Amino acid sequence: MNTLEQLPFDNTYTRLPDVFFERVMPTGFPETHLVSFNPGAGELIDLDPDQAKRPEFHQAFGGKQLLPGSDPIAMLYAGHQFGHYVPQLGDGRAILLGEVRNSRGEKWDLQLKGAGMTRFSRDGDGRAVLRSTIREYLCGEAMHGLGIPTTRSLCIIGGDEGVLRERPEPGAMLIRMAPTHVRFGSFEVFFYRRQQEHLKTLADYVVAEHFPEWIDDDAKYRRFLAEIARRTGVMIAHWQAVGWAHGVMNTDNMSILGLTLDYGPYGFMNDFNPGFIPNHSDHQGRYSFQNQPDIGYWNVRAIAQALSPLVEESDLAGAPELYEETMLKTYAELMQAKLGLQETHEGDDKLRRDLFAQMHSNHVDYTNFFRALGNFKQDDPGANAEIRDQFLDREGFDWWAERYQARLKAERSVDAERKVRMDHCNPKYILRNYLAQVAIQRATEQQDYSEIDRLLELLRHPFDDQPEMNEYATPPPDWGKHIVVSCSS
Ligand code: AMP
Ligand code: MG
């Protein structure tokens, strides 16, 4: 186990040419304090959890004091925002403190978000508010608990200075962790600048660091592109299956490792609604829930284009196709599992579509429906009241349930066994906006951070029945149905 000072930094990104980043010191708050520490992420860098109790911890991860071996940089990238290319973005408020190699040889970026201005800050102040920091911190871990590829969250450090948004709000910083923060936009910037040598340097870097088995492979760039496409497909299939929308799927928020990256105005659906738009500023609904698979395709085309100087023309077109194939296949598998089906029969797609239509028109809670469906009894309709009562149109549900029952019989499904399987893939607990909002209110108004830790612990085990936490599985109360979240805060 490492102390803070023993963290073994190996800052590979800083060994790239200077154009890839800006060396920049974090701007700490005058006073800092620990808001929350996540021991689960600490393990990834072999960090002794007791270290979080030291004042040096919040000083180091609040940007006030550098750890030995840290070499802070802001990374350059560009990206397509809402379909339009923006030639320069970059880390405007995040600073990569360095990369730590753990005892298993894995490397983890320690990125400090809200660390002050950089060359890439444009009109921003380089800061993050406590509210949005809590949302990102919790959701990274909630997604991880759900088995969805994502960045991780190490800690939140609070500052004593207010940050001005619509009104002054408490400021904070987050340590976000990922094997790399390289994004689609990290490549796009060099493609559009026509700097092919840098494009190649970056591709070689990523292959060497993350796919070393391909270093000597003539097809390494093609493989790399295909892997991005495949992983993006897997990631988005998981989002769709769990009923989650990212909110800002710009190419600068798309990880080349297929990790869910940059938690802003995201949301888990409550009632099933394909048109769900979590981002209040997304007036056109470009990034609505149902558009995500298509946007994934659009984004994979963008990364394919960015890599076009390195990959044969004939191989480029294959990337979006591979993305689509992977996404559809993974999604179908995940949904079969959510329905408790082990075989694939003709008509399964229709069964699912009909269910969705019923759920939509009846405003049925997506998460709670699937969780309850695990209790479905094939031969005792009376026992299915808990599920049936979620639908206003009971007959509509009966019509579907009859076909579901027949489908279960067709594969000789055993109720008790199916329930065990379904409980492993239909979460009981998700990070509903209103749950995060309660934690945010207590933190910002009363400096009471206990609810953050409670949610963190709960969401580590979203599939476990935790009877004492039952109230956390309820759909939002009226006040929590229309919480507004929008871009950068
Ligand atoms: P996001 O919407 O968080 O993905 O951010 C898009 C771009 O805006 C990135 O280049 C960010 O670094 C930058 N940005 C967002 N918020 C701020 C801020 N408060 N200060 C400086 N840059 C920011
Ligand atoms: Mg971003």
Image (cartoon, grey):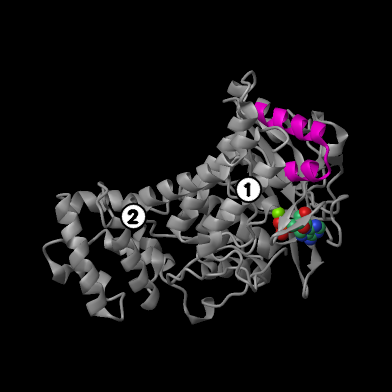
Q: Which residue is mark 1?
A: 301
Give the image location of residue 31, x and y in percent. Answer: 81, 55
The quarter of the picture showing ligand 2: bottom right
Residue lying at 66% horizontally and 33% vertically, measured from the top left: 311
Percent position of residue 165, x then y: 78, 70
Magenta stretch contains residue 126: no
Q: Quadrant of residue 389?
A: bottom left
Point out the stretch of residues depicted in magenta: 186-207
Which mark is first along the chain, 2 or 1? 1
Amino acid carrying mark 1 in the image: Arg
Q: Is residue 53 visible?
A: no
Whether label 1 lies within 8 Å of ligand 2 gets the answer no
Q: Residue at x 60, y 29 (%)?
A: 106
Left or right, residue 39 beside residue 241: right
Packing grade of label 1 (10 A; few <14, some 14-19, many >=20) is many
* Place of residue 67 in the rendered image (x, y in percent of width and height, measured from the top left): 78, 36
**Amino acid at pointer 2:** Lys
Of 437 and 265, nearer the camera is 265
State the residue at coordinates (57%, 36%).
226
Which quadrant holds the N terminus?
top right
Q: Which residue is mark 2?
A: 338
The dot on residue 433 is: none
